[in-house]
Amino acid sequence: MSPDVSPDYELSDDDANVHHAWDNSLDPVLTVEPGEVVRFECRDAVDGQVGMEATAEEFGEVSFDPVHPLTGPVYVEGAEPGDVLAVELLDFEHKGWGYTGFMPGDMGLGLLPEDFEDPGYHAWELDGDVGHFVDGIEVPLDPFPGTIGNAPGEAGEHDTLPPRDVGGNMDVKHLTEGSTVYLPVENEGALFSTGDCHAAQGDGEVCVTGIEAPMFVTARFDVLKDRDIEQPEFESDHPYTATGEDEPMYGTTGIAPDLMDATKEAVRHMITHLHEERGLSRAEAYILCSAAVDLKVSEVVDAPNWTVSAYLPESIFP
């Protein structure tokens, strides 16, 4: 964050500032004017149930009721239904650790639950802009909020797991420092919240977690009266490779008449590559894919089969 930008307000992750469901009846914990800056303290995705010493078995037993603690809601003066809330992401600060894990296969979570009967877990030491994996592998960090959004206009409590028209658990890895996300407003004041921060993530978040990390998020708000969007949009100069430079990649493809099946095949082939060529266990390979492998839809025009590609940055290896 620029040294000449300081928060107008700070919201801690105290219970009074945290909620676990989208609900437009929640009282705002803070009211701000357009142009003001807020520093949010955000808990990790499973609300402190695991730590650096946790095991895969312990991760497999975490409760999802509730999950995704969100800091907020923040009421932005002047925001009305039909407006757009512009959220400029100014700064992210992690707390030195994070984790990536996957659940037991019978829970049906992640891209490949049928391939992994038992849970997996890796606690990451986060050192500046690098996360340390096994065998000397280092993943570049570029933090972002996995969940960022406004309260939906529909009354009642709404699960935080699926993304919505007003944002939420979108897991867009390009919403990094310097980015601006535009969110439709469905309630007076917008009622903005954020959390579920990731220190890094591959496009796809295939094992169901990125590098989940407690974090501070600093953002500036504005209300746009002359914009009309139906779902979130954003501006970002996020680099499209791990280092921000052109670099060698190893790619695998999945080809199938269904895009989800093609996605699964691309990731399966990458897991096999990491296992056979890089010496990782299949569980370690699955975790690394979620943290550092980017999925891309390569083509959807050559019926009856579509192609999905998985990209592995080779710079992460020692």
Image (cartoon, rainbow, N blue to C red):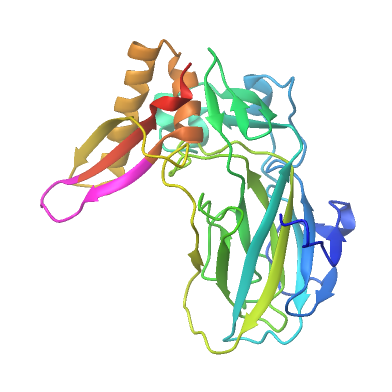
Name the residue located 47 percent from the left edge and 79 percent from the top edge: 229
User: Can you say whether 123 is above or below 152 in the image?
Assistant: above
Residue 283 seen in this snapshot: yes
User: Can you say whether 227 is above or below 118 in the image?
Assistant: below
Picture quadrant of residue 7: bottom right
Name the residue located 46 percent from the left edge and 19 percent from the top edge: 317
Q: Nearer the viewer, residue 104 or 313?
A: 313
Left-right relation of 183 to 39: left
| Magenta stretch: includes residue 132 | no
Magenta extent: 295-306
Q: Nearer the viewer, residue 313 or 308?
A: 313
Left-right relation of 155 to 231: right
Picture quadrant of residue 24: bottom right
Name the residue located 63 percent from the left edge and 66 percent from the top edge: 88
Left-right relation of 170 to 275: right
User: Can you say whether 211 is above or below 193 in the image?
Assistant: above
Left-right relation of 265 to 79: left
Name the residue located 48 percent from the left edge and 56 percent from the top edge: 237
